[in-house]
Amino acid sequence: MDLLNTLVDKGLRRVPPTRGEALAVLATSDDDLLDVVAAAGRVRRHWFGRRVKLNYLVNLKSGLCPEDCSYCSQRLGSKAGILKYTWLKPDQASEAAAAGLAGGAKRVCLVASGRGPTDKDVDRVSETIRTIKEQNEDVEVCACLGLLSDGQAERLRAAGADAYNHNLNTSEATYGDITTTHTYADRVDTVQKAHAAGLSACSGLIAGMGETDEDLVDVVFSLRELDPDSVPVNFLIPFEGTPLAKEWNLTPQRCLRILAMVRFVCPDAEVRIAGGREVHLRSMQPLALHLANSIFLGDYLTSEGQAGKADLEMIADAGFEVEGTDQVTLPEHRAGGCRTGEGGGCASASAASATSAASPASEAGEPRTDLVAVRRRGAGTDLAPNA
Ligand code: SF4
């Protein structure tokens, strides 16, 4: 297929596809799916080999958020029966992190619900970061605390944070449909603050919220412009008790196309399969490793993932290897700070119009509430974590 040859050629040279080409990936048919995966897999292997980076989530503070993000089980007014607790103490967080690291993770993601941290919260998380780093050599720490105020990113960096996560989630045009308590511009501003403070920026999206293909392409091109080192791709878990509980829009094939599109647009970024991997990719998870070079090990913030042991077995069975602490995740040009690719920097994406390619064969997902399990172990409980 000419489209795929073009996309591989561009991906190997870090040249962005056109918007039309990105849309065409989403519109490929099920008959072409393996060809799409193989093509994006070539780009993935070029930049990341067969390595899979494992990340481990520690939910420092769960639930009771004043914001109204429709997709979130921790939102204002959520009726989802999730764990609710206030800040973990540094030793509790470090203990949870150690379980993930022992399971093979090299990055710990410290997440707290809320609009954004107060300065006291930044002090608290800084102490937690220092504790984790003292107790676990070589660990990478990413903080995810919401919208940052001036100076907070610098303070987290000084405390030892390596990265900061704040997702754009969806396109600017539809952002107001999913959240009213903050804006898309607020989110962009926080990613830029993290960048400016010397933190590795991590920013991604959520698919499956009823968005169009154009919305998905918009948000991925916006991410490319922001140039995060890591791009988590979440597949909406439609929690009962949230406004999006009925949005079962994804099929495994659709998820694979989305991951392939993200890989072509952000060829040398760490593309991470995030929440919803087990629920939406299901038995196609191993195929997705040909597209993404990073996953979360074990459980998510408020839902349970498959057993950490099953994650490791899946990686080995699919012919991939867990990335070690002695291996550098990002290609050399990125790790060295040079972000300008041959053929233009990250803001040079063409604005070509959409193609009129036919819609893919299978789009509507069946509700799989049977696969959604609220997290009842690990951080905030007396039970051992899944790692
Ligand atoms: S700010 Fe974060 S924790 Fe709060 S509702 Fe939005 S996504 Fe959920």
Image: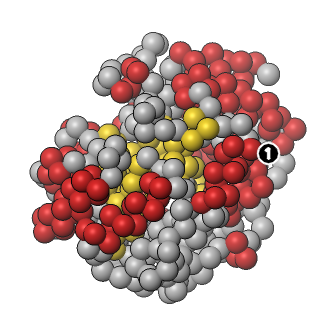
Q: Residue at x 84, y 48 (%)?
A: 361
365 w.r.t. 359: above or below: below
Q: Residue at x 65, y 73 (%)?
A: 372
* Rendered location of residue 5, percent (x, y): 71, 18
Asked whether mark 1 and ligand 1 are closer than 8 Å, the reply comes as no
Residue reaching furthest to the top? 342
Quarter where residue 217 is shown: top right
Instruction: Return the residue nearer the eye: 45 or 8.
Output: 45
Quarter that holds the N terminus? top right
- Name the residue tied to disc 1: 360
The answer, for residue 165, to whether it is visible in the render is: yes
The answer, for residue 288, to whether it is visible in the render is: no
Residue type of the residue flagged with mark 1: Pro
253 w.r.t. 39: above or below: below
The coloring applied to the image is secondary structure
Q: Residue at x 63, y 64 (%)?
A: 307
* Rendered location of residue 281, percent (x, y): 71, 55
Quarter where residue 200 is shown: top left
* Rendered location of residue 9, percent (x, y): 63, 16
Quarter that holds the C terminus? bottom right
* Rendered location of residue 313, percent (x, y): 69, 51
Q: Dot 1 surroundings within 10 Å: few (below 14), some, or many (20 or more)?
A: some
250 w.r.t. 237: above or below: above
* 278 displayed left or right of 33: left
Q: Residue at x 28, y 69 (%)?
A: 91
Instruction: Return the residue nearer the eye: 114 or 85.
Output: 85
Describe the element under mark 1 as helix, strand or loop: loop
Instruction: Return the residue nearer the eye: 355 or 76.
Output: 76
